[in-house]
Amino acid sequence: MTMASYLTLVAAILLLLLLAGLWRVMRGPTTADGMLASQLFGTAGVAILMLLGIVQQQNALLNTALVLALLAPLTLITFVVLAGRKS
């Protein structure tokens, strides 16, 4: 197997992890579970985009991963602010 095959396999495993996170969002008993799953989406999404960017040698995917990595913490901040207002 080549390195590209291994990286593609890792991206597929991360995609399965995202599906497990989606299950937690749908079935989570609290909103905090959903928030943690959305952070998982951000982290795994960045990892998948970076892996695919390396495999396909496309800088656009790497740039998109960096933008997603910068935007992901904003969702957490928004959640904390909104959860603080409800309490």
Image: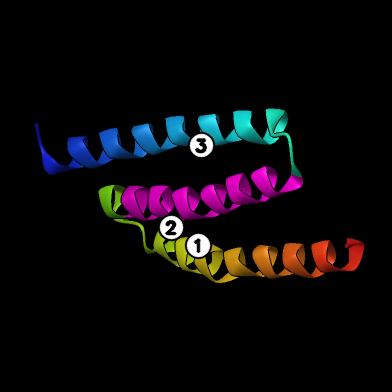
- Inspect the image, locate mark 1, and give the three-letter code of the amino acid beneath it: Thr
First to last magenta residue range: 31-53
Lateral position of residue 43 relative to residue 2, left or right: right
Residue, far front: 87
Q: Specify the quadrant of the image occupied by residue 3.
A: top left
Q: Position of residue 29 (x, y in %)?
A: 73, 34
- Check disc 2 and report its element: helix, strand or loop: helix
Mark 3 near mark 1, Cβ–Cβ under 8 Å?
no
Residue, far left: 1
Query: Is 16 situated above or below 35?
Result: above
Marks 2/3: CA distance? Answer: 18 Å
Q: Position of residue 26 (x, y in %)?
A: 71, 30
Kindly identify which residue carries mark 3: 18
Mark 2 near mark 1, Cβ–Cβ under 8 Å?
yes
Q: Specify the quadrant of the image occupied by residue 86.
A: bottom right
**x 70%, y 28%: residue:** 27
